[in-house]
Image: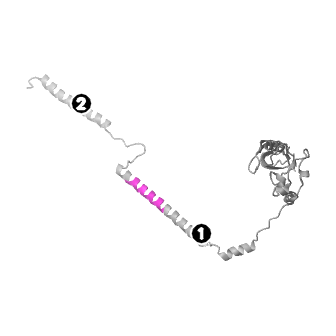
Amino acid sequence: MFNSKSKRLGFFGTILFHVLFIIVCFYTTMGSTLILPPEGIEVQYMPYEKINKAEETILVSKDKVVDEVVVDHDELVEKLIQEKTAETVLPTYEDSLTNQDQNPEKEDYISLELEEALNKLNQPKSSQELFNDNMEDTIVVDDLELNDKNDGYILSDNRFAVMKVKPRYTCNESGTVVVRVWVNREGRTIKAEAGVRGTTESASCLLSEAKIAALKTTWTPYFDAPEIQIGQITYNFYRN
């Protein structure tokens, strides 16, 4: 097989080359596969199942805490209610009578202004004091014939007729005419409606003259009163 010297040298040279090549490759790969120690902070990951168990434990503990707080609050409220019920004592009939005796009701006193107004209402006035004398054959009855209703002029407790105009009487009919009036704060009659409830004679001439006289009537000014107050005037027509 190896007859010549050159073949033997070539064979052994080839083997030596491969051996050297294998040795070089071995040492080269050892340097690259060396595992270096890890750098930085080591993080340990927990298994997924353990995390769920931990969360369930936390939730259960929170539910228990909430239940305990609710129970404690209910017990506290119940305790306060019991204490309040124990402290509350209903007064007896004897206690009520004693309190009434100790606190007698104050008597109501009538003010001086109200007394003067009532006295003015109760003072009788004649027809000559109530009306202007324009007609000789027309008479309007005084307040004694009008059931003490302030001589037929009614507006409010503290407002009275200042100027009372006597209506003309040109009709043959006789009877009572009631006029509803609207009065402002200055005491002026701004509207009148004759023939309202209480009227016994609805002749047009009587209604017309009664309305004219009512519109000329003036009243006591009262600026604390409502903007418009409604009253009434009663005229009684008859001949001598």
**Coordinates of residue 233 in the picture (x, y in percent):** 81, 49
Q: Is residue 49 rendered to the left or right of residue 232?
A: left
> Against 13, is 29 above or below?
below
- Residue 220 is tagged as none
Mark 2 Cα within 10 Å, few/some/many (few <14, many 20+)? few
Q: Secondary structure at mark 1?
A: helix
Residue at the spot 40% in from the left edge and 56% down from the top edge = 57
CA gap between label 1 and label 2 equals 103 Å
What amino acid is labelled 1 in the image?
Answer: Lys
- Location of the N terminus by quadrant is top left
* Relative image position of residue 144 (x, y in whole percent): 85, 57
Q: Which residue is mark 2?
A: 21
- Mark 1: give few (<14), some (14-19) or many (20+) Cα within 10 Å: few
Q: Is residue 50 left or right of residue 139?
A: left
Q: Where residue 224 sits in the image (x, y, percent)?
A: 81, 49
Amino acid type assigned to the residue bearing label 2 in the image: Phe
Q: Quadrant of residue 207?
A: top right
Q: Nearer the viewer, mark 1 or mark 2?
A: 1
In the rendered structure, which segment of residues is drawn in magenta?
53-68
Instruction: Give the labeled residue for mark 1.
Output: 84
Q: Magenta stretch: residue 40 in it? A: no
Could you tell me which secondary element the residue under label 2 belongs to? helix
Seen in the picture, residue 13 relative to 93 is either above or below; the reply is above
The tag earlier along the polypeptide, 1 or 2, is 2
* Residue 225 seen by the camera: no
